[in-house]
Amino acid sequence: MTIVAVLSMKGGVGKSTVALGLASAAWDRSLRTLVIDLDPQANATMALDAGDAVFTTSDVLADARPGVAVDAVVPSGWAEGIDLIPAERSLEHRNVAQGRHSALRLRTALATLPRSYGLVVIDCPPSLGELTRNALSTADVAVVVTEPSHFSLHGAKEALEAVDVIASATNPDLRAKALVVNRFDPDDREHLLNLQRLGEAHGPLVYDPPLPVCSAIPASQRAVSPIHAWNAPGSRDVADIMDDLLDSLLPPERPTREMPKVSIRRFLT
């Protein structure tokens, strides 16, 4: 089981889009997946349309007994094999420290999660509060999401620093695996410049290729559909990128899909 935390330090950059894209890629290859929504905005919860839930991530963190998270798992509206622990607005009250081992509450609550899950995706809020600390203290790998804008570049740097802080404090096995640039327009000179700056600052951590501006993404989310099942212009390109990203996050012994890489360099020449 691989646990992936998807985070950003700036809202509105498409963090939930990447979390849902990874779940969609897992669904496409029949990899049983659990999405944990730790964002009080609950975008992933709405996109997965889990219906009425008895418990949420707020309840899980409030209780935090070993294994209690299993009681909050509900099936998603996508298809069998994609489950969810939903979020709600009251989760905002959990974004402050709650005792000495506050950042380990989610890890403890997931202690008896069934090993039949091949992937767990945690959608973090866009801040380094206690919710994100819990996600990073639980995860194996972190994926940082940003846009190719000036202010988002600073947020990406803060997010990567946060991963290093948690790795040195509560989760020494945690590693940042990818910095995903979302809503990239190759015809926008500012986007090209900021993509180049990201590459100079973070090197191979910048995921190649960036996710393009694509109307199929919000359309599939409104329709409660995985992007892999959405037939619209651009959806296959996005699905292929998410397939490759998922391959880069899973253990190397797991069979991976072969697909051609699209180099960032072609956007900069």
Image (cartoon, grey):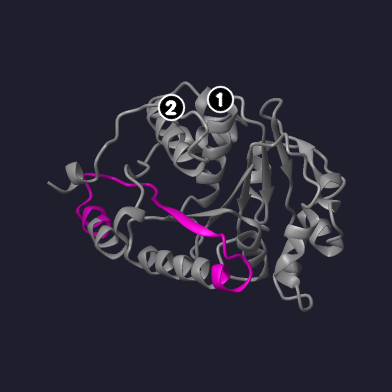
- Tell me the residue at 74%/59% (across/down): 106
Q: CA distance from mark 1 to mark 2?
A: 10 Å
**In the image, residue 238 lies at what x, y percent?**
41, 33
Res 203 → quadrant: bottom left
The residue nearer to you, when weighing 233 against 249, is: 249
Q: Is residue 226 above or below residue 177?
A: above
**In the image, residue 47 lies at what x, y percent?**
63, 39
The residue nearer to you, when weighing 131 against 214, is: 131
Residue extending farthest left: 269
Which one is earlier in the sequence, the residue at label 1 or at label 2?
A: 1
Looking at the rendered structure, the secondary structure element under dot 2 is loop
- Tell me the residue at 60%/74% (across/down): 169
Q: Residues within 10 Å of mark 2 (few under 14, many from 20)?
A: few
Q: Which residue is mark 2?
A: 257
User: Label 1 is placed on what type of residue?
Assistant: Arg
User: Label 2 is placed on what type of residue?
Assistant: Arg
Q: Which residue is mark 1?
A: 29
Residue 184 in magenta?
yes
- Tell me the residue at 62%/30% (across/down): 31
**In the image, residue 100 lies at what x, y percent?**
77, 78
Residue 188 in magenta?
yes
**In the image, residue 232 lies at what x, y percent?**
43, 24
Are the two marked residues, 1 and 2, in contact with CB atoms closer than 8 angstroms?
yes
Tag on residue 177? none
Residue extending farthest bottom: 100
Left/right of residue 26 with respect to residue 108 in the rendered view: left
- Part of the protein shown in magenta: 166-195
